[in-house]
Image: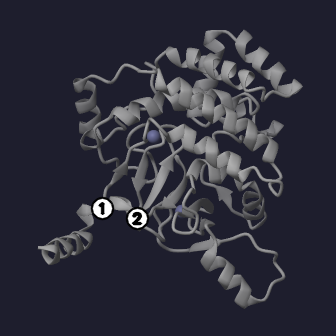
Amino acid sequence: MVQRIVEAARIESLDPSAIPRLRMPERATIFAARAARLVQLADASNPIAGYLRLMAALADAQQRVLAGFNAPMPSRASIELNQRHSMPIVPALTDARDPAWRDVLFMLLDGIEAAGALTPALTQLVGRLRATDAAALDSQADAVLALRFAEIDPAAAPFIAAALQVVWTDLASRIDTKDVPYLDTPGVCPVCGSVPVASIVRVGGAYDGYRYAQCGLCATELHVVRAKCTNCDSTKGIAYHVMGTGDEPESEKSARAKSAPLKAESCDECGTYRKIGYQDKAYDFEPYADDLASLTLDLLMGEAGYRRAAPHPWLWPEHSEDDR
Ligand SMILES: [Zn+2]
Ligand SMILES: [Zn+2]
């Protein structure tokens, strides 16, 4: 009997259709796990430790708000229409955004305030956001979701993004994976149409050994094969980069590369990179948190001439005047 079960499992692993295509967010733990990981990564050696602790308070607030939040689910007809057109099932770019996202924003601001996480500059920012009218908040949300950098206020955008994440993560956590269509566009979340932040090679259960790219908005994870660009689908010109001292001997470099729990995967075809984490080397690796906390690797990748495939929703580049 045991023999037969083992054999069936082995055969299944040879069948690509057996790979779980999606891993939906766990609504009971998704943001709490991020918060815990951010605290873990905010050690003395991290140059942005203070920011990571603030964002941990924000993720904790997201978890509490999500627990009591239920956005209206799309109708059967709208699900089927989007399936027929290979469109994301609950598109982020929509004219019908749930206005409750603004209430979520204010609850998150209350949450970080109650956590005592605010510096004077942040107190000012929170006051400014509370005083912003609905139409202006909605246009900030549109700019963040459409990545229209010239219109984004980089200081406010993490909080706008956090509120939108609660709404879409709520939807994603209640969607039946069988309803999620296949899209024609590579590198885009089939649930909400947003771009992923980073990827993770998971351990355990049905996901063991497979790589998933985590959506920066709804936290859905989409299976992506390894050694393939998550931005343009190219399998040519892929390389991996790890943090190093730069002057160590080659043998130490390759040992470091083998054991690194986090790497940047670059693509020479499109000139971008995304980070990839290995859960067998860091079990608590959380793509969103680990991506944010490894800003030093971003700086090195920038020096090496690569661009991020997508910005981190909690760390927006200051745009220069020429972008306007
Ligand atoms: Zn998504
Ligand atoms: Zn590429």
| Callout 2: SS | loop
Q: Which of the pair 215/49 is nearer the observer?
A: 49
> Which quadrant is the C terminus positioned in?
top right
Q: Is residue 125 above or below residue 318?
A: above
Q: Which residue is tagged 2?
A: 210
Specify whether tag 2 is near ligand 1 (CB below 8 Å): no
- Percent across and percent down for residue 156 are 72, 27
Q: Is residue 67 above or below residue 298?
A: above
Q: Does the CB distance between marks 1 and 2 fall below 8 Å? A: yes
Crowding at mark 2 (Cα within 10 Å: few <14, some 14-19, many 20+): some
Outermost residue toward the right?
120
Marks 1 and 2 sit apart, C-alpha to C-alpha, by 8 Å
Q: Quadrant of residue 164?
A: top right
**Which residue is depicted at the point 59% across and 74% down?**
239
Number of dots carrying numbers: 2
- Percent across and percent down for residue 292 are 68, 49
Outermost residue toward the front?
1
**Which residue is depicted at the point 32% across and 35% down?**
175
Q: Is residue 188 above or below residue 81?
A: below
Q: Quadrant of residue 193?
A: top left
Q: Amino acid at mark 2?
A: Tyr
- Percent across and percent down for residue 142 are 57, 26
Q: Visible in this render: residue 18?
A: yes
- Nearer the N terminus, badge 1 or badge 2? 1
Q: Amino acid at mark 1?
A: Ile
Q: Quadrant of residue 180?
A: top left
* 216 to the left or right of 55: left
Q: Which residue is tagged 1?
A: 19
**Which residue is depicted at the point 50% across and 40% down?**
30
* 64 to the left or right of 220: right
